[in-house]
Amino acid sequence: MIRNSWPLMENNIDREDLDSLISYLKNDDPRLTQGPKVQEFEEKWSEWLGVKHSVMVNSGSSANDLTLLALREVSGPGEVIVPPLTWVSDIASVLHAGFTPKFVDISPQTLALNDELVLRSITSKTKAVFLTHILGFNGLTDRLLMELERLNIKLIEDVCESHGATHNGKKLGSFGWASNFSFYYAHHLSTIEGGMICSDDFELIEVVKMLRSHGLLRESKDKDLKSKYKFEYPDLNPEFIFTYAGHNMRSTEINAVLGLQQLSRLDSNNLIRAKNLELFLDNLNSIFFRTNFFRDGNSNYAFTLILNQPDFKLRDTIENLLVQNKVEFRRGLSGGGNQLRQPYLKQYENLPNPETYRETEHVHHFGWYIGNHPRINESDIYWLTNLLNKAVTNK
């Protein structure tokens, strides 16, 4: 065995990052709450991503919540199309904002929403399509983008697991009305905890800025909006006008310092992860495992392992072998598989049967992910694929 163990995640915050933070903290009276460093990171992130605006928050889940709350403010109530295969906070944010989630199954090649099924599911009630780019794969298609634009349906991209992945050479997160990123522990870029909301829509960004900070008007840079509220509410202190029932989801200067430091090596690390995934998939036994994913522009922080055919006995054999060899894994891929099986949704009426989502159900029972880190070498990957191939050929 090449490694003593294969952890699911490795801490992306290294000594160089910590030294940069220590250097910042040694300044005379360093600011710690949200301030210039957060703004600098927002600007650098926007430049890297290719969007006009970014707003840093305290987590990717908060990014989801604020985006959906902003959607409610600008679009009113209705339905939001979502995949059953996603992280819990995507579905939760739809519910928190008072929307009705409309579930659509995934594509086996991208693990994201099946574009044909999405377009069939759009009605007059549809306010947005909330698409998750799973584990670094590109979930967009030209047909989906073109039709959503024609129908004037907003696209929200969850890019929490896919920093730097691309569609037609353009970074994911720069296509939608809004996009959300997470900077958690072992994601492509980590700020301890943190997230980002990105958009070219000035109105959306101004709403998000206010929602992030208790709904305070003073967070907005829209001079006309400020004048309007000050005129309508002359009895209020202009510094304390609360336009929305907002939250405190701000980040800190500490998080931003780490983000700025890590951004400098994000692209190079992503190239390593993408190369690792190609080597992993190319060396798997394609008779038993899926290898025909749409890989163009991938930026995977995990190795995707899915059986071609349902086989509970083989599934258990593979899991036992991974445990014996100290290879950490998660069954069900993102969010543990089919969200419609989760207890938090049981309180809601008229939800569909999870078993009707065949592709998501297959991944739920016969799919895993294994950690993909920039520090993994080729010999490690050959060892892992040989281990997995032996498991299926000796069954």
Image: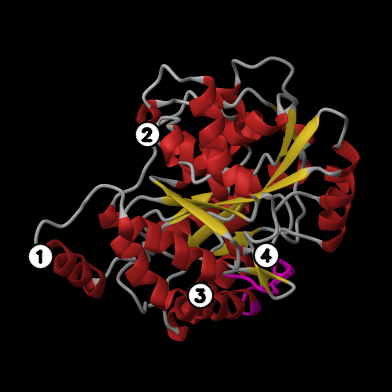
Disc 3 is placed on an element classified as helix
| Mark 4 vs mark 3: in front | 3
Q: Amino acid at mark 1?
A: Lys
Task: Please say whether residue 291 is one of the residues in the magenta stretch.
Answer: yes
Identify residue type, mark 2.
Asn
Which comes before the other along the chain, label 4 or label 2? 2
Magenta-highlighted residues: 282-300
Please name the predominant secondary structure of the magenta segment in the image.
Answer: loop
**Residue located beneath label 3 in the image:** 270
Q: Quadrant of residue 286?
A: bottom right
Residue type pointed to by label 3: Asn
Q: Is residue 93 above or below residue 25?
A: above
| Amino acid of disc 4 | Phe
Residue at 56% over, 25% down: 96
* Quadrant in which the N terminus appears: bottom left
Q: CA distance from mark 1 to mark 2?
A: 27 Å
Which residue in the structure is indicated by mark 1? 26
For this rendering, which residue is in front, 123 or 287?
A: 123
Instruction: Give the mark, 2 or 3, whose residue is nearer the N terminus.
Output: 2
Q: Residue at (67%, 26%) from the top-left corner?
A: 99
Spot occupied by residue 196 in the image (x, y as percentages of width and height): 48, 52
The C terminus appears in which quarter of the rendering?
A: bottom right
Please tell me whether mark 1 or mark 4 is closer to you in this view: 1
Tags 4 and 3 touching, CB below 8 Å: no
Alpha carbon of mark 3 to alpha carbon of mark 1: how far?
Answer: 31 Å
The reply to whether callout 1 and callout 2 are in contact (CB within 8 Å) is no
Q: Quadrant of residue 50?
A: bottom right
Q: Is residue 247 above or below residue 12?
A: above
Q: Earlier in the sequence, mark 1 or mark 2?
A: 1
